[in-house]
Image (tube, coloured by chain):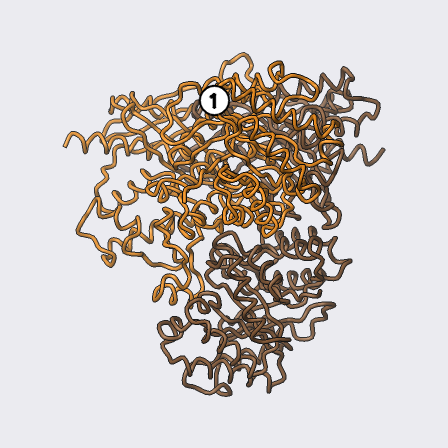
Chain colours: A orange, B brown
Amino acid sequence: MKLTILDSTLRDGLQGEGVSFSESDKRKVILALDKLGIAYIEAGNPASNPKDADLFQSLQGISLSHAQLVAFGSTRRKNSRADLDAGLKGLLRAGTQVVSLFGKTSPLHVRRVLETTLEENLAMIRESVAFLKEQGRRVIYDAEHFFDGYALDPQYALETLRAALQGGAEILCLCDTNGAAYPADIAGMTRAAAAAFPGVCIGIHCHNDCGLAVAGSMEAVRAGASHVQGTLLGFGERCGNADLSTLIPNLQLKQGYSCIPRDCMPSLTATARKVADIANFSLPGNRPYVGGSAFAHKGGMHIDGVTKIPSSFEHVSPESVGNRRKFLMSEISGKSGLLARIQKYDPSLTKTSPKTQEILEQLKALEYRGYQFEAAEESFDLVIRRALGLQRKYFTLDHFKTIGEQPLFGRLHPSSAMVKIRVGEESQISAAEGNGPINALDLALRGALTHFYPSLAQVRLTDYKVRVLESDATTAATVRVLIESTDGEHTWTTVGVSTDIIEASFLALRDSIEYKLAMDEDRQA
Amino acid sequence: MKLTILDSTLRDGLQGEGVSFSESDKRKVILALDKLGIAYIEAGNPASNPKDADLFQSLQGISLSHAQLVAFGSTRRKNSRADLDAGLKGLLRAGTQVVSLFGKTSPLHVRRVLETTLEENLAMIRESVAFLKEQGRRVIYDAEHFFDGYALDPQYALETLRAALQGGAEILCLCDTNGAAYPADIAGMTRAAAAAFPGVCIGIHCHNDCGLAVAGSMEAVRAGASHVQGTLLGFGERCGNADLSTLIPNLQLKQGYSCIPRDCMPSLTATARKVADIANFSLPGNRPYVGGSAFAHKGGMHIDGVTKIPSSFEHVSPESVGNRRKFLMSEISGKSGLLARIQKYDPSLTKTSPKTQEILEQLKALEYRGYQFEAAEESFDLVIRRALGLQRKYFTLDHFKTIGEQPLFGRLHPSSAMVKIRVGEESQISAAEGNGPINALDLALRGALTHFYPSLAQVRLTDYKVRVLESDATTAATVRVLIESTDGEHTWTTVGVSTDIIEASFLALRDSIEYKLAMDEDRQA
């Protein structure tokens, strides 16, 4: 059975503490979610938040493969007209095909928070939905506090849904806004709603205040819901929304529902990590399905067991979600990504070749020091190439020095860098100024190398990320820098790790350059 | 109805990646769990792990108020005698009143992992339990893979439980060892076990591979289980065990079961944070009940709602678990959260005061530039204090210079910094070396200032985070630095933003220092 998934990372997710995205971050998240096959992407509340309004403007004309963009907003203000309501107009201006509208379900809230009558609330819902429909929008109606409201007054709760339906809503989404409802109760009330409106798409939107958002969503689906809302990584107000990276595989791989296209499922882990990276969020290792340790076995008996019967300690195959089994002692699984990648460079190597073992040990040692290659595949390739003797040394660093200075005393730039490199017998020294020490270093390094390798002039950096690891050791902590580069044709990501942010950046820059030069050579050959 | 809780942080919890405790850490955890009122503390597997054996020796004679210590181990080896089994002897040597014994439930595992007969497995269980009982122990029997086993062969699964009961087991604990079972199915099978052994205490032990460990445990309790196993913070193999810091309040505050003494519940949050500290684990803000953001409200409408009806967005009172409500400041919450904070400094200000408007505008402008104050409340306080004329200028930066250099040419440190500051008429210049430019700058700055403000010698940094904003502009992008500082008594977080990571760090450091000095002055007044 087919379910439609709505991701609200960019709307509900942003109501979580410590979560914020720049506009370009949001675009990247949208593209990643679209690639994963998510049906609806709720990208903001344009009437409430000017940045969201700007985002929707800039998203006009964006080309998506799977997803519909959704703008979120409130029913009209009480005692006014839908067609004159500033909020609804803001919602329309977003220009999305689909809108989410939220309204009150509980008499308690209608009287004490909205401070209006039960009748007026129904009119607010009905008229707002109808207005948006007239303007050509498809409407998802979010019944706020549905479960509390239904418990208090089941009749009225269903009236509010009916009002939305009368207005022309396509989906009636039941929201457990305070995260308090018990899954079995959610099932009962969802069943009642589905029975009251046969043939209508019922949705579910849970919060995780009791650690039950995933369970509640699944129970709602069992009871008849066919639209499921959450956020990819569980971001959201207070304890967050239902975690889609858990929910989607639970529903699709374990219960046979269709949530995303089949061939998108193996991208789940990579997508989760990508969005985590964009959010500068450290994805916990023990996150179901997508965490680094989700399939990591430590206990000796467990390793023995899972080797004999994988299902004894693995309820799905790691590869089905794009993850891999990990042994916290040294082991390689035949089909794992590592061997395939090595064989790309030397097909004669097998699982048991000494060289393979050597490369695995190097990778483990680097990972132990803080390197992470999932998001930096090209640095990974360089480790393999160097181990196999395939990587020429394109330059040697003789010396670099960076200087940062405040105040500026009339200068334009706070930082400068000097770099001396050597290629064969010939040296080149270059200097540059920049907005910071790393900017200056990047410019100086490439300035020196372009003398020997003119193709480097086409290389630009397109992304730069810093992650402080073991941050308890504070400013003496290890830093991991990720750099994304492009030459206009290809894009590649490299990584550097050090306690010194400048050295870490240098290592990532050096790998970027070496990878580009190796690519150029391979293409000439 | 009374439930007994067993915490396995020090046994199952240690099978999670990245979790390790020293012996003195373990003692601290035991005392904390005991103080919380946990009934059983499973402290290790002495036969399998020599460190655990040592721990149990050192715990002889420990004085606990609520808890029983439990040693964990396996049934005897196949085709041998319980009284000659080294593992069981090791279990006894631990000297605990209570032991947990695990055995196989599924025919698949008995044949292919243990490689023995179904009958022998029953004997292993029965005889091992009986032996321990004869030696005066109370036995909790853990039926491994119970739910998979029952699905495969319900008859045999119940036989294994019967064997344990015949041996004298006090609790029959059903384990979802691979975390794959669905809560509704757990309920059905638990009901069957309870019906097969009326009057016997049935236990539940779930894993979180599907994000359903808490839900599964609760369904088992509804179906008749009265013993619940988990780990306080959800640590454990792969995706962890059932999170007791969520499960206990769910069962006790929301469903009326008695899990821990009533007057222990308000210590839940403090205990969770203490154990997290001991584990060097950063407790996520969005953890139910005990997370820093569990009761944190951001959306303006939510703040409005929760002020009018707390239950609208808070399903239990924060104080009941020892947590507190928090309003987050951000562009979304407009004036609601902000006002409360401003009134802390000047109670005469209202929503409409010009000063309030001015501060809001400053906040918006800073946030637009990349500042984020939710995680850096003290920097925000400084914005308010400065706007209200309450913040003295404690020092002026004359000049700083940082130098980063590679290779090291025999030096120990890649970076050095020189800082000159002025307090009134007097200047102080200081230099330091460090692992990176920011480490060096931090040391040099505080070195210079301690001359004027000796209390700064007590300040240490405890966390340092870097976030690159608008990272498409790459190494020239804006950088946001967050710093957490402590003087041993208080902890505070400050922020700095710049395109230059060094300047951003300096601004965060400066705010940290100014906040500390302001706090000192306020306390003297």
**Residue in the foreground of this view, choosing between B135 and B485:** B135
- Density class for disc 1 (Cα within 10 Å; few <14, some 14-19, many ≥20) is many
**Residue in the foreground of this view, choosing between A398 and A20:** A20
- On the rendered structure, is A35 left or right of B310? left
In the rendered structure, which amino acid carries the disc numbered 1?
Thr
Q: Could you say which quadrant of the image residue B115 lies in? A: bottom left
Quick check: can you spot residue B443? no
Where B169 sits versus A493, above or below? below
Q: Which residue is mark 1?
A: A96
**Residue in the foreground of this view, choosing between B504 and A142:** A142
Q: Secondary structure at mark 1?
A: loop
Can you name the residue that lies furthest to the top here?
A: A410
- On the rendered structure, is B117 left or right of A102? left
**Chain at numbered mark 1:** A
Give how far across and how far down residue A5 sits, in percent: 46, 38
Where B335 sits versus B447, above or below? above
Give how far across and how far down residue B497 sits, in percent: 57, 25
- On the rendered structure, is A9 left or right of B37? left
Residue visible at 56% across and 57% down? Answer: B242
Q: Which quarter of the figure is the N terminus of chain B placed in? A: bottom right
**Residue in the foreground of this view, choosing between A218 and B467:** A218
Query: How many numbered marks appear?
Result: 1
Quick check: can you spot residue A221? yes
Residue visible at 56% across and 48% down? Answer: A216
Q: Which quarter of the figure is the C terminus of chain B placed in? A: top right
